[in-house]
Image (cartoon, rainbow, N blue to C red):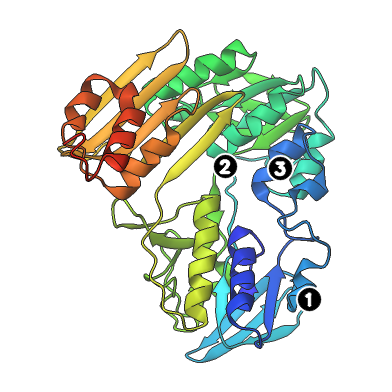
């Protein structure tokens, strides 16, 4: 059984069926309708696609054709034994399982202020949220977004494109996208947003939301037609209480995506898996990571021992047309070297982080010309040799370094 129909869950059931033609496979989704891609929500909001375009699998009857039972129910409680257990659903029904994959993702983490349940206050996380937001997106509408992290960044492009008056509240964080960007990069992205009419507020404390809705801060009050809460997410793990599965930042798993309960696995945003760069066990809320988690977990569930190498932390964000990427240890490593190149006028920024002559992290803002090269150098941990000094002087030569180091081997090039 697989609980959760996001990228991890869908990839898992498909992999399970590919390698096991006989077992009963059930996919349980806590939301109505067919499994969809959450990252498609901004494109629904700006009218680029309709809701059908957000479906993860477009072929009608996809799951039925694979012999997968698909249920629109929410898991309320899991009971576990060493050789299996039961899942209680929100309609009171109880399902038996021999092996269970928890791929329940995350839910919005609401700010600790009064008024988050008032009319006109929504999150930006589900299709239901998208419908509520789309209903308000008219030119001139006053929209306040509380939060300035990755979730907020994903939504901004859709909102600005509709002609609304957008206020983004970063609050005490003092900068937007603080968890994925240096202060230099954040300031550049903020200038870009402000040039496109977004009011970015990086000081002051949010005190409450009043009917209207109206946002009350200690420095100002903002009247709104819609308030969007984008203050982060938290893993959906409450139904695992009492199972013995260890919970930390998320559900703790081993190299085979197995939890501390032998018959229960976890994958995706809910799983605390291995970080490729650091070797630490963290939650990487990234769609490519979730998809790979689901595949690896399924292989191990059918007995094909397949260890997980770890996921490379990588964020890609389109901030109203300005593309940014972060890779690996972009903050830098203790004792390592860092080089930055900034072109404020043209909104270009590159930051490279090294440990010895190995690149361990990077940030780019601007056209994604060298993204593949950066990812390749970081993910392969390839020694840079003479290219280390060259990149410290000229960070923009990443592609040249990658090509020579990758394709010049065996010919004495770049050594």
Query: Helix, strand, or loop for circle 2?
Result: loop
Q: Residue 151 vs residue 325: left or right?
A: right
Q: CA distance from mark 2 to mark 1?
A: 30 Å
32 versus 182 height, above or below: below
Q: Is residue 269 visible?
A: no
Task: Decide which of tag 2 and tag 3 comes sooner along the chain.
Answer: 3
Q: CA distance from mark 2 to mark 3?
A: 22 Å
The tally of labels here is 3
The image quarter in which residue 4 lies: bottom right
The disc at residue 28 is none
Task: Check if mark 2's residue and mark 3's residue have beta carbons within 8 Å.
Answer: no
Q: Position of residue 299 (x, y in %)?
A: 50, 75
Quarter of the image for the C terminus: give it. Answer: top left
State the residue at coordinates (37%, 70%): 255
Q: Which label sits on residue 41?
A: 3
Q: Residue at x 46, y 52 (%)?
A: 284
Which residue is more in the foreground, 397 or 404? Answer: 404
Residue on which the image places disc 1? 91
The disc, 1 or 3, on the residue closer to the chain's N-terminal end is 3
Residue 156 or 348: which is nearer the viewer? 348
Secondary element under disc 1, as helix, strand or loop, is loop
Mark 1 and mark 2 in contact (Cβ < 8 Å)? no
- Return the residue at label 2: 111
To which quarter of the image does residue 137 belong? Answer: top right
């Amino acid at each position: 059984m697989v609980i959760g129909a996001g990228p991890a869950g869908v990839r898992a059931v498909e992999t399970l069926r590919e390698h096991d033609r006989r077992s009963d496979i059930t996919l349980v989704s806590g939301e109505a309708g067919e499994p969809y891609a959450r990252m498609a929500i901004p494109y629904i909001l700006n009218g680029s696609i309709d809701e059908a375009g957000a479906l993860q699998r477009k072929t009608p009857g996809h799951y039925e054709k694979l012999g997968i039972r698909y249920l629109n129910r929410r898991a309320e409680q899991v009971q576990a034994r060493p050789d299996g257990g039961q899942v209680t659903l929100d309609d009171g029904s109880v399902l038996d399982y021999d092996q269970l994959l928890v791929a329940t993702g995350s839910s919005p983490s609401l700010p600790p202020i009064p008024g988050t349940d008032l009319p006109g206050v929504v999150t930006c996380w589900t299709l239901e949220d998208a419908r509520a937001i789309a209903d308000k997106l008219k030119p001139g509408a006053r929209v306040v977004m509380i939060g300035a992290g990755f979730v907020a960044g994903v939504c901004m492009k859709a909102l600005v494109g509709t002609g609304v008056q957008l206020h983004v509240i970063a609050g005490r964080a003092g900068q937007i996208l603080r968890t994925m960007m240096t202060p230099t990069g954040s300031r550049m992205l903020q200038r870009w947003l402000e040039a496109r009419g977004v009011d970015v507020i990086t000081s002051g404390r949010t005190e409450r939301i009043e009917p209207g809705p109206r946002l009350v801060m200690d420095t100002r009050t903002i009247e709104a037609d819609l308030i969007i809460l984008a203050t982060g997410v938290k893993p959906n793990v409450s139904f695992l209480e009492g199972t013995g599965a260890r919970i930390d930042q998320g559900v703790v798993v081993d190299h085979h995506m197995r939890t501390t309960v032998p018959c229960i696995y976890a994958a995706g945003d809910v799983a605390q898996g291995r970080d490729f760069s650091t070797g630490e066990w963290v939650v990487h809320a990234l769609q490519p990571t979730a998809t790979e988690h689901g595949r690896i977990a399924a292989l191990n569930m059918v007995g094909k021992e397949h260890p997980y190498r770890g996921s490379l932390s990588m964020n890609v964000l389109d901030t109203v047309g300005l593309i940014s990427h972060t890779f690996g240890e972009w903050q830098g490593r203790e004792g390592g070297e860092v080089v930055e190149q900034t072109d404020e006028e043209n909104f270009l920024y590159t930051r490279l982080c090294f440990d010895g002559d190995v690149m361990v992290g990077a940030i780019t803002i601007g056209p994604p010309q060298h993204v593949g090269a950066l990812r390749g150098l970081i993910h392969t941990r390839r020694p840079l040799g003479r290219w280390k000094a060259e990149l410290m002087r000229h960070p923009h030569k990443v592609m040249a370094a990658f090509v020579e180091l990758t394709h010049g081997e065996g010919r004495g090039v770049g050594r």
